[in-house]
Image (spheres, grey):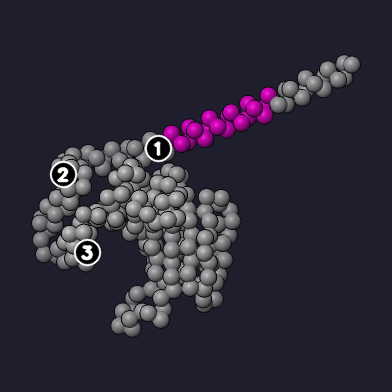
């Protein structure tokens, strides 16, 4: 690692130290794995590998470190990377930052996943997906969801193909996306728009519900503390009376 990369990894370690829901699983000069539990109680695993020697010299914009995010509802699904785990196409905006900085930006975004989901619909879709539904999904992308069936049939478009489609025929592209949504969720485009709205409402509701739970738990702890104080004050009074 270069000196800037070492400093950025030091910052990553300090962030992990301050957050109990973030764990560095592996940290070497060529491989980093970090596991995060978000506010939604979903689990995320960020992996990065050094690939400097394997980079094509003709692709000057390709970063030296790869970066991938695996997500699931249960921690064990992420650890074992079984059929209930999915890939999220999430990347920091600035790909030129040192690898530690890029991982930290993902850690903070996923740690606050409920808030982040309000800005990234793809993440909101993952959060509200039931575990059984995740078994049929491989990748969550900005533009579409890739299912097991699409991979098996080997006819689903890559993001590069979608970019070309945007340049040639926007109307045909929209029909393609609507077809994907109908195949995956079994709803029309109008129903899908309503579903997206319900996803956003559910995310907001989850956030408010968790906030109330935290407040209720805090009040309960305060009551229990006060009961203990009252008990020992009463015992002290009896002792002094004797």
167 or 100, which is in the foreground? 100
User: Comparing marks 2 and 3, which lies closer to the viewer?
Assistant: 3
| Discs 2, 3 touching: Cβ within 8 Å | no
- Secondary element type, mark 1: helix
Q: Is residue 149 above or below residue 214?
A: below
Q: Quadrant of the C terminus?
A: top right
Side of 13 where 74 appears, left or right: left
CA–CA distance between discs 2 and 1? 25 Å
Label 1 neighbour load within 10 Å: few <14, some 14-19, many 20+: some
Among numbered discs 2 and 1, the one appearing first in the sequence: 2
Circle 1 sits on which residue? 206
Q: Viewed as shown, does residue 178 lie left or right of 195?
A: left
Q: What residue is rendered at 34% in x and 44% in y?
A: 131
State the CA–CA distance, disc 2 to disc 3: 22 Å
What SS does tag 2 mark? Answer: helix
- Residue 189: mark in rendering: 2
Give the magenta range. 208-227
Q: Relative to 17, does residue 181 appear above or below in the rendering?
A: above
Q: Residue tagged by mark 3?
A: 158
Q: Earlier in the sequence, mark 2 or mark 3?
A: 3
């Amino acid at each position: 690692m270069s000196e800037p990369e070492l400093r950025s990894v030091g910052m990553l370690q300090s962030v992990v130290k301050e957050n109990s829901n973030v764990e560095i699983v592996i940290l070497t000069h060529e491989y980093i794995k970090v596991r995060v539990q978000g506010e939604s109680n979903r689990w995320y695993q960020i992996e990065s590998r050094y690939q400097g020697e394997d980079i094509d010299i003709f692709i000057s914009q390709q970063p030296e470190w790869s970066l991938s995010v695996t997500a699931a509802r249960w921690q064990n699904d992420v650890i074992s990377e079984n059929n209930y785990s999915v890939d999220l196409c999430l990347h920091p905006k600035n790909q030129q930052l040192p690898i530690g900085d890029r991982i930290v930006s993902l850690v903070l975004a996923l740690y606050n996943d409920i808030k982040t989901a309000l800005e990234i619909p793809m993440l909101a879709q993952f959060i509200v997906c039931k575990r059984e539904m995740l078994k049929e999904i491989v990748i969550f992308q900005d533009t579409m969801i890739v299912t097991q069936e699409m991979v098996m049939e080997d006819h689903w478009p890559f993001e590069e193909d979608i970019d070309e489609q945007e340049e040639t025929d926007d109307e045909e592209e929209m029909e393609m996306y609507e077809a994907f949504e109908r195949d995956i969720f079994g709803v029309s485009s109008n129903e899908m728009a309503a579903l997206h709205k319900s996803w956003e409402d559910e995310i907001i509701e989850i956030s408010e519900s968790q906030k109330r739970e935290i407040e209720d738990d805090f009040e309960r702890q305060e009551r229990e503390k006060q009961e203990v104080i009252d008990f020992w004050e009463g015992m002290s009074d009896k002792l002094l009376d004797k």
